[in-house]
């Protein structure tokens, strides 16, 4: 009887999660250090509070995919929404445009631009 109850509970959880609201990510784009011309820095794109965990994050510099991007393992909060971080090293030059392109679960991709003044 105990196994049946656990299985039924698990099945209800799976059904609930599959019918849960789609939650697009909240996206923050920032640099590790304040922007300084010609100095090494790190661009960080932090996505949080999204569900389900299907997400694609691309870092761009002047419209080109940045090389050497790295990512932290995806994880989840107590409310079962997820968070994820992708980052890449760069050297800032005036006029550079650094973006984080995010696609989540079939929604249109959004582009979030880094503001070097922040």
Image (spheres, rainbow, N blue to C red):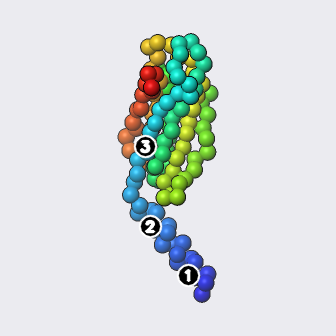
Farthest residue in the bottom direction? Answer: 1
* Residue drawn at 46 percent across, 49 percent down: 49
Give the alpha-carbon distance from disc 1 to disc 3, as whole Å: 37 Å
Which SS class for mark 1? Answer: helix
Verify CB contact (< 8 Å) between mark 2 and mark 3: no
- Write the residue at 56% across / 25% down: 33
Would you say 15 lies left or right of 41 here?
left
Above or below, 12 relative to 67: below
Which numbered disc, 2 or 3, marks the residue closer to the eye? 3
10 relative to 15 in the view: left or right: right
Give the residue pinned by disc 2: 16
Foreground mark, 1 or 3?
3
Between disc 2 and disc 3, whose residue precedes?
Answer: 2
Residue 44 on image: x %, y %: 53, 32
Judge by depth and name the residue closer to the eye, 74 or 64: 74
Q: Which residue does the numbered mark 1 point to in the structure image? A: 5
Residue 67 can be seen, yes or no = no
Q: Position of residue 27 (x, y in %)?
A: 44, 39
Helix, strand or loop for disc 3 = strand
- On the image, numbered disc 3 is attached to which residue? 26
């Amino acid at each position: 009887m105990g196994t049946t109850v656990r299985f039924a509970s698990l099945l209800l959880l799976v059904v609930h999660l599959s019918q849960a609201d789609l939650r697009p990510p909240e996206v923050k784009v920032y640099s590790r250090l304040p922007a300084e011309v010609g100095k090494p820095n790190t661009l960080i794109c932090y996505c949080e509070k999204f569900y389900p965990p299907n997400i694609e994050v691309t870092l761009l510099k002047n419209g080109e995919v940045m090389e050497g991007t790295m990512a932290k393992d995806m994880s989840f909060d107590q409310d079962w929404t997820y968070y994820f971080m992708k980052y890449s090293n760069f050297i800032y030059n005036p006029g550079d445009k650094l973006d984080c392109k995010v696609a989540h679960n079939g929604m249109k991709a959004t582009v979030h631009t880094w503001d070097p003044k922040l």
